[in-house]
Amino acid sequence: MSDNPEVLFKKMIERSDEAFLIYNIAERRFTYANHSFEEITRRSREQLLEDPASMIEVIHPEDRDLAKRVFVRLLRKTTSTLLDFRIIRPDYTERWIRLKTYPIREGKKIEFLTGIMEDDTARKASLLNMQKVNGWKDSILEILAHDLRGPIGIVKMLAAAIDQQLNGNKNKEIRKWTKMIQEISNRNIQLIHALVKKESLDTANVVISKEAIDLVWEVEEVMKIYTNSQKEASKQFHFTYSHETIFAHIDSMRFLQIINNLISNSIKFTGPDGVIKVHIEKLEKSALISVSDNGIGIPRSLQPLLFKKYTQAGRTGLDGQESIGLGMWIVKSFTDAHCGNVWFESEEGKGTTVYVDIPLGYEEEYEPTTLDESAASKKQN
């Protein structure tokens, strides 16, 4: 058997489960695709080589605009890029694709764009499930902390009231027990506070890891948890959106933490009959999320401190919920990490609206040099 590296690499590529692609930039066409392209997409590689625009038809309709924008960037980018998107097979099943691209340069000019494509559906499903569980965990932790602090606080107050009513040596033993109840209650309240604080700090220290996610689906799952948990409290929750699906290339867990913190704040400062609204608006390059309530609002003196750590802006909630002093700082930090913006409008006695504007992941304007035009140019020639 030949030990020629080129021959061996070619045999390796032809046996690989990953699809290897080569795109000639000057000729605007694919010049190579191994057999795994057909295994992954269930489409002919001959068709891809003859008609580069057929690649667009493979991509999921909701991801095509993103794919076009990214492709334009890749034609000029001199470093490798990792991206993920969905495809639709001929039998209409969806698959997640993970594509690593490598530009090949001749001097300063990029001659070829090569890529390694793999079916990432199993890993993506596992990741989405993990993100969902983490989102639920954050929501439930906040809800449990709220629900437990209240009853334990009541037990503590009742024990203190009983202690005050008891006098003399005759009730000495009972007073000792009520003191123990107060101490145990106080320790548990402090434990809940420390647990939520530690979870918030741990969350804030996690490195951003971006994936393509549907913002509408993510927020809807979180809203279900809050809606179900607040039925007894008679608060009204409303979730609206401009589009059925709004995809963005962001860190799902950090995004959910932003949403959790904003909704949690609204709950803390809105009365039993309060209304909490969440809306997502898809803009040209970003998604604008707003969380509004008709609660007590933020005093003007505290507004400049809202996004800072451990300040007076971390107030006690209407039901006695203690503030950790990190919630809005985390919202600001995670929004900044996504190159987004956050601001708010608030009036005492009328409520608060917080706006979070997060880029969809398109770093440059969409340009007309696309796979579609490449194909059209080829057909005209």
Image (tube, rainbow, N blue to C red):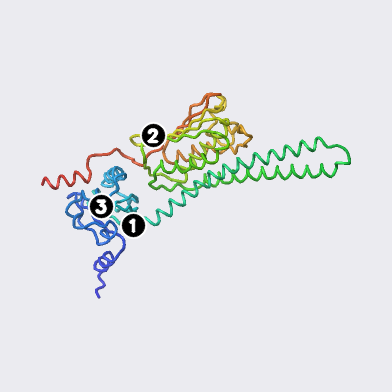
Q: Is residue 341 visible to us here? A: no
Tag 3 residue: 113
Q: Quadrant of residue 151?
A: top right
Query: Which one is earlier in the sequence, the residue at label 1 or at label 2?
Result: 1
Q: Position of residue 116 (x, y in %)?
A: 30, 57
- Front residue of 4/59: it is 59
Tag 1 residue: 119
> Residue flagged by tag 2: what amino acid is it?
Glu
Q: Is residue 231 above or below residue 92?
A: above
The residues bearing labels 1 and 2 have C-alpha atoms spaced at a distance of 31 Å
Tag 2 residue: 281
Q: Secondary structure at mark 2?
A: strand
- The label number, if any, that marks residue 316 in the structure image: none
The residues bearing labels 3 and 1 have C-alpha atoms spaced at a distance of 20 Å
Q: Secondary structure at mark 1?
A: strand
Query: Which one is earlier in the sequence, the residue at label 2 or at label 3?
Result: 3
Residue shown at the point (71%, 40%) measured from the top left: 155
